[in-house]
Image (tube, grey):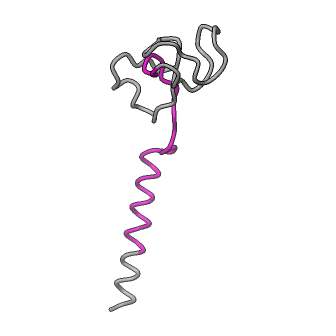
């Protein structure tokens, strides 16, 4: 009985992992999202080339600055522009 339960649990775990992997090849994938960064909280260079470092955005929600967001989130955010 114990071996059968262990085998069934292993089969269930493997099939669940297989389904999750098939659903999303990169579960931790990130994408650039412009227009949602708070002032001084952007991740890197601006789209317009005026700034080349993280943390240089002067205003909230500047459409030239971006932050990494989980894939698919950017389109859900007000003002978010996938980059």
Q: As drawn, is 77 to the left or to the right of 47? A: left
Name the residue rendered at 40%, 55% in the picture.
19
Name the residue rendered at 40%, 19% in the picture.
80
Which of the two residues, 56 or 33, is positioned nearer the viewer here? 56
**Is residue 16 highlighted in magenta?**
yes
**Residue 6: percent from left, percent from top:** 39, 82
Q: As drawn, is 4 to the left or to the right of 50? A: left
**Residue 18: percent from left, percent from top:** 45, 58
Q: Is residue 38 above or below residue 51?
A: below
Disc count in the image?
0
Which of the two residues, 42 or 83, is positioned nearer the viewer here? 42
What span is colored magenta in the figure? Answer: 10-38
**Residue 38: percent from left, percent from top:** 45, 22
Quadrant of res 74 = top left
Quadrant showing the N terminus = bottom left
Name the residue rendered at 33%, 26% in the picture.
76
Q: Is residue 22 above or below residue 11?
A: above
Quadrant of res 45 = top right
**Residue 63: percent from left, percent from top:** 47, 11
């Amino acid at each position: 009985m114990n071996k059968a339960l262990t085998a069934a649990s292993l089969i269930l775990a493997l099939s669940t992992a297989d389904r999750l992997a098939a659903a999303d090849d990169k579960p931790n994938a990130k994408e650039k999202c412009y227009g949602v960064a708070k002032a001084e909280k952007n991740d890197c260079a601006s789209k317009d080339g005026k700034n080349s470092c993280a943390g240089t955005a002067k205003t909230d929600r500047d459409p030239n600055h971006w932050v990494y967001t989980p894939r698919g989130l950017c389109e859900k955010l007000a003002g978010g522009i996938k980059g």
